Amino acid sequence: MSRIPLKPYLLTKDEEGRFTLTVRETRYNSQGYPLVTATRIDETFQTANAARSHAREHFGAEAGQFAMK
């Protein structure tokens, strides 16, 4: 089983071209199975850079912690 955690910040583009941010937390149970909690932020952003900036300011995100979908 892979123990590489998911990138904690997921950026998705909706049908209108706006970006949403989802914050993911990966924990492991006593058998080493990953448990992922995903929380979608209600705010939408015009650009992916605006969403990244929001994550840096409010959650302490760093470069390399973002995934796009």
Image (spheres, grey):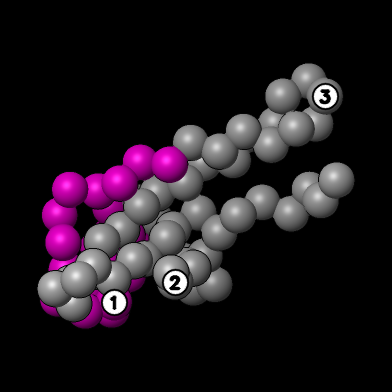
Amino acid type at image mark 3: Gln
Tell me the number on the disc at residue 31: 3
Amino acid type at image mark 2: Met
Q: Indicate whether residue 7 is drawn in magenta.
A: no
Q: For mark 1, does the 10 Å Cα neighbourhood hold few (<14), some (14 to 19), or many (20 or more) residues?
A: some
Tell me the number on the disc at residue 68: 2
Residue pointed to by mark 1: 48
Specify start and end residues of the magenta stretch as a single range. Answer: 38-58
User: 59 or 16: which is nearer to us?
Assistant: 16
- Element marked by disc 3: loop
Q: Position of residue 3 (x, y in %)?
A: 78, 48
Figure quadrant of residue 39: top left
The answer to whether 52 appears left or right of 10 in the picture is left
Amino acid type at image mark 1: Ala
Tell me the number on the disc at residue 3: none
- Lower position in the chain sequence, tag 3 or tag 2: 3
Q: Is residue 49 above or below residue 5?
A: below
Mark-to-mark CA distance, 3 and 2: 29 Å
Figure quadrant of residue 13: bottom left
Residue drawn at the location 29% of the way across and 76% of the way down: 48
Q: Which quadrant: the N terminus?
A: top right
Which residue lies most toward the front here? 15
Q: Position of residue 10 (x, y in %)?
A: 42, 60
Q: For mark 2, does the 10 Å Cα neighbourhood hold few (<14), some (14 to 19), or many (20 or more) residues?
A: few
User: 62 or 40: which is nearer to us?
Assistant: 40
Figure quadrant of residue 32: top right
Q: Which quadrant: the C terminus?
A: bottom left
The answer to whether 13 appears left or right of 46 in the picture is right
- Element marked by disc 2: strand
- Element marked by disc 1: helix
Residue 50 seen in the figure: yes
Mark-to-mark CA distance, 1 and 2: 9 Å
